[in-house]
Amino acid sequence: MFQLEEFIIQFLLNFVAREDLNAFLRNPQHTATIVGSLIAVSGALLGTFLLLRGMSLTSDAISHTVLLGIVVAFILMGSLFGQHPDLSSGWLIVGAAAAGVATVLLTELIYRSGLVKQDAALGLAFPLLFAIAVILVSRVVSDVHLDEDAVMVGEIGVAWANTNSHCLSGCESVTITPDDPRAEMTRQCTNCRNLGISPRDDKAEFTTICTNCGDYSPAQAWQAGFTRQEPVLVFWPKSITVMAVMTLLTLLAIVLFYKELKLSTFDPTLAAALGFRPTLLHYGLMVLVSLVAVGAFDAVGSILVVAFFIIPPAAAYLLTDRLPRMLLYSSLIGAAGAYSGYDLARGNLLGVVHLSDILAAFNNLFGLGLSEQWDSSISASMVLMTFLFFLAAWVFSPKYGLVSTMLRRRNQRRSFDDQVVLGHIHRHQGRAAESDELTASTLYRHFRWSPAKMERTLRQLAARNLVQIEADQVSLTDHGETHAHQFRQTQLTNESVGELST
Amino acid sequence: MTKNYKLTTKNSSSDRRIWLLIGATALIAALFVPFSQLFLHVEYDYTLRTVALGGALLGIVSGVLGCFAVLRRQSLLGDALSHAALPGVAIAFLLAGRDLGLLLIGAGVTSWLGVYFIRLVTGTTRIKQDAAMGIVLAAWFAAGIALLVYIQARPDASQAGLDTFIFGQAAAIIERDVRLIAAVGTVSFIVLALFWKEFKLITFDAEFAGANGFRVNLLSMALSTLIVVAIVLGLQLAGVILMVGMLIASGIAARQWTNQLGQMVILSAVFGAFAGGAGAIISAIDADIPTGPLIVVVAFLLVAISLGFAPGRGLVWTLLRRLSDRRRFAAQTMLQDLYHYAIDHGRADLPAPESFLFGVRGATAKEGLRQLHARGQVQRSNGAWMLTPAGIEAASRDDRNHQLWAVYRQYADDLALPAIAEDRQQDIADLLPPESVAKLEFKLDTIRNAAAPPAQEQSLPNAVTDH
């Protein structure tokens, strides 16, 4: 990871000055947006396949149980090496990925028993694993970083502060040993806590320890005042690297196995018959989902990450029928949600509305005394923006949207109305009860329509030069005659074709 | 007539078993209290009594209503809806302050809106139900988190403890909450009892219900509303994340023991009460163990026991049955193997080399030969096995039976034979009336004679190599 960061920094420094890069990264908004977008893109890419496979909620299960993997790895590391690892440590990621796969395996084990339906199997497996994780958290690791807030919302807002420092020049690492003159020694009671006695007690035993011994990176050494010359540093947020690696892995897997994934998603039987090992792909996909979920854990927590897997693909699913476009759209929607979500957390909804105005309006209307300063969770706001984009896609999608569906239905209804009226006139024109059947002002009764509807239909037909109304009598124009005749012909053809085929 | 009679006796005996089981579980649940006092040294102070009672009541409510979620294949709906309750809690707090009843009403409203949204999305688009539930889960939960974070930024401390709804906090339950759970639970049970027939119908055959003029949409919304009620009541104890486990686990466990809805619901209630009560009591042993997760773990143990040991369906029984089947078939398989090996090589008492038999059948050979030897149907002579005269007789009878079965399968319609289920372990002569057997035998002999005389055994290839 560290070398990768060095590499990226060296590359970036070709284009921007070091101070600008530091300033850019130190801006919480930039780092949060980058991390959020990376999560959103990798989640959206994988989520697209999950959605199409009807497995969206598996991501929910996995993201919950990733916590168990992290906790178990955390405890194991603590007991094996006597030192709790950082949340971006490779071992935690391995543990979390294993937990993700274990969830899927447990679900399938329960489901394969044939006694429980698939949804129920999923609903059994992940609450159990999550419950175990929560018990472990509160019993074993109650005093560490893994607190509830981290599980729920993550810390994307402070992602900029958790950095690796990369030294470019003037680098001087320092190692302080107990013999060093700069070492600070202090006495510590070794048995006070165990026996529950105060250090002043006679039975207390002491040992001398060094409080500031250890290795200092150039940045730490400068901060602690061990070095005289200020090193030239770049502070690179760790979570950017983690998520960038996850996103690259995801992209790479999808590019390499695109054909296989596509086939096994749309026709698993054929994929199996052609020897593409759909089961292997299935588990590969699950591993990737776990990896992204654990990578995102730090930033957005264990539950909100589900949104990045499910909502953007669902929105893209309403916009297109092509898999490549769906992948592209869902990534874009996810990234856009992440970008605009940061502003929403500060109360700025797409630059159009400011939430503090709304809160003020609420206060004025109901006298609630709400705080008018909207300052909320960044990750949750990102999800809300993504959801907003989903709603927009749902309403306005050109093909599947509510509006276009409504318009299409209305047009169909209207054209059906037109045809019915034309047919009626065609049927009765020049027949016995013509004057009775074709009176414009009472025509609506024959259809049991409202007068307004009949009037509108006749007006439209007249406008299209299909009917004419003379002395309250409706009749077809020549054009209308041809139209009705043609329609009748095609209907007859369709019917006979239908009869032939049945 | 006789069949009907048999059916009812069987049902009433299994009925009695279920009621016994329900009674036994209830008894164990009741005995758990003195047990925990004696052996786990749990002290029943006021808090624990309240929490345990609340947990048990909640287990009953969610157990009963969860059954329907399980049967309607909406287990994960519980997950989505419990997450969807969070913004309601926050909004209710913002509007009306900290009053549990109002908070729960708020939770119910947003959760119910979640149900409605899922219906709307699945009804108007091609998005499937699981994805729609995922959307509701994530978006509603995000809204809840956003509001909670906004609320937490308030300078005063009135919002403290609001986030216990996320993970649940059993210790916060007071007597008034228990009364609330009991009251609301009773009301929802009354509704359930009033619409029992309708709910049963839409659960098992919604299309039939619709065809008979029941308002399926309305009814299923009502049922979902009841599920929402159960979820909302449980939030304080189990929290939004684990509520789904509490909702469905006891239902799944109960489903294993019975095929009747009424029994399943009652059993599920007992299981739920046990999980809720015992979970709360065990978690009192150590202050560090959170109650909600422990209840889920206990409930899952009940599920594991049910999946393993439920009569008829349980995995243990299935496994045992498979083993005993294998033993039962081993002798028969070896008898046939020896017989055909010998016949194919010219005479019926030809010995077959042991290494050959073991190589083909593995463990089955060992087991089967042991059984046959005990019956005196085979004997061993220098590294090979051969049939005794008794063995040859049994084998040829068995072989003939198989061939009759094969003829039956092929010609049952042509010969106008009565329909029976194919079970080659049984003697077909026992299942069919004598005249039908005679027809079968005649047909078999005709086929054999029609075939070339030396290829007698090959005339019905599938009869010979059928197993």
Image (cartoon, coloured by chain):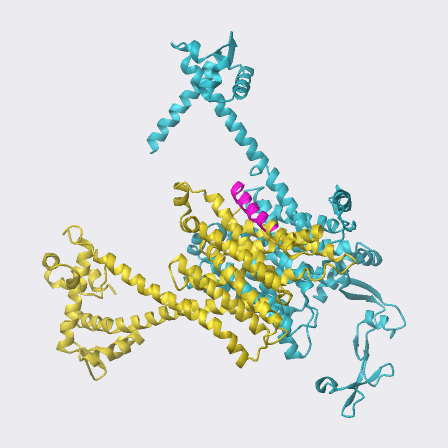
Chain colours: A cyan, B yellow
Magenta stretch holds residue A187 = no
Image position of B218 with respect to B383: above or below = above
Q: Position of residue A231 (x, y in %)?
A: 85, 67
The front one of B457 and B186 is B186
**Quadrant (top left/top right/bottom left/bottom right) for the N terminus of chain B:** bottom left
Magenta-colored span? B110-125
Image position of B379 with respect to A225: above or below = below
- Displayed quadrant of residue A131: bottom right
Image position of A367 with respect to A167: above or below = above
Magenta span: predominant SS is helix
- Please give left or right for residue B325 compared with residue A482 in the image: left
Q: Position of residue A314 (x, y in %)?
A: 58, 47
Q: Position of residue B73 (x, y in %)?
A: 46, 54
Q: Position of residue B98 (x, y in %)?
A: 69, 56
Magenta stretch holds residue B113 = yes
- Please give left or right for residue A206 compared with residue B254 in the image: right
The front one of A210 and A475 is A475
Q: Residue furthest right?
A: A228
Whether residue A257 is visible to the viewer of this picture, yes or no, is: no
**Quadrant (top left/top right/bottom left/bottom right) for the C terminus of chain B:** bottom left
Residue drawn at point x = 38 percent, y = 23 percent: A492
The front one of B22 and B378 is B22
Image position of B353 with respect to A11: above or below = below
Residue drawn at point x = 61 percent, y = 68 percent: A134
- Displayed quadrant of residue B436: bottom left
Q: Residue furthest top?
A: A471
The front one of B215 and B122 is B215
Whether residue A336 is visible to the viewer of this picture, yes or no, is: yes
